[in-house]
Amino acid sequence: MSDEELKAGMVHAGMSEEYADMLAGLDRRIRENGSEDQVTHTVERVTGRRPISFEQFVQTHVDIWK
């Protein structure tokens, strides 16, 4: 999805153009610079359990979406 498509979708959902433009800009920086490509230990610290992958989560809970 292009930045313009993302922005247009947010505006269509009722967001102001200025705010949608700012969010699309943040998304671009995340995509281009990998600024959110990080691993933390928060899940284990908060829950006391090791995290699982999204794929594992889906496989474990597949019946919920049927």
Image (cartoon, rainbow, N blue to C red):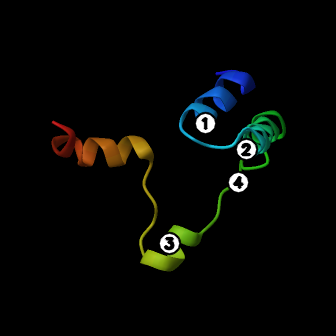
Residue 40 percent location from the top left of the image: 64, 64
Q: Amino acid at mark 3?
A: Glu
User: What is the x, y in percent for residue 51?
Assistant: 46, 61
Crowdedness of circle 1 by 10 Å Cα count: few (<14), some, many (20+)?
some
Q: Secondary structure at mark 2?
A: helix
Quarter of the image with the N terminus in it: top right
Q: Residue at x 28, y 41 (%)?
A: 59
According to the picture, the residue beneath numbered tag 1 turns out to be 10
For label 4, the residue is 38
Taking 36 as reference, is 64 left or right? left
Q: Are marks 1 and 3 in contact (CB under 8 Å)?
A: no
Q: Left or right: 14 with respect to 3?
A: left
* Residue on which the image places disc 2: 23
Mark 1 lies on a secondary structure that is helix
Q: Quadrant of residue 33?
A: top right
4 or 1: tag closer to the N-terminus: 1
Judging depth in this view, the residue of 20 and 36 nearest the camera is 20
Q: Residues within 10 Å of mark 4 (few under 14, many from 20)?
A: few
Q: Quadrant of residue 30?
A: top right
How far separated are the C-alphas under marks 2 and 4?
20 Å
Of the two numbered discs 2 and 3 in the rendering, the one whose residue sits closer to the viewer: 2
Q: Find residue 10 and report its horizontal and vertical position in percent.
A: 61, 36
Precedes in sequence: disc 4 or disc 3: 4
Q: Are marks 2 and 1 in contact (CB under 8 Å)?
A: yes
Image position, residue 8 (x, y; %): 65, 27
Q: In the rendered structure, which amino acid carries the disc numbered 2?
A: Leu
Q: In whole angstroms, how far apart are the C-alphas of marks 2 and 1? A: 9 Å
Judged from the image, the secondary structure of the residue bearing numbered disc 4 is loop
Per the rendering, the mark at residue 22 is none
Between 33 and 26, the one lying in front of the other is 26
Q: Give amino acid for label 1.
A: Met
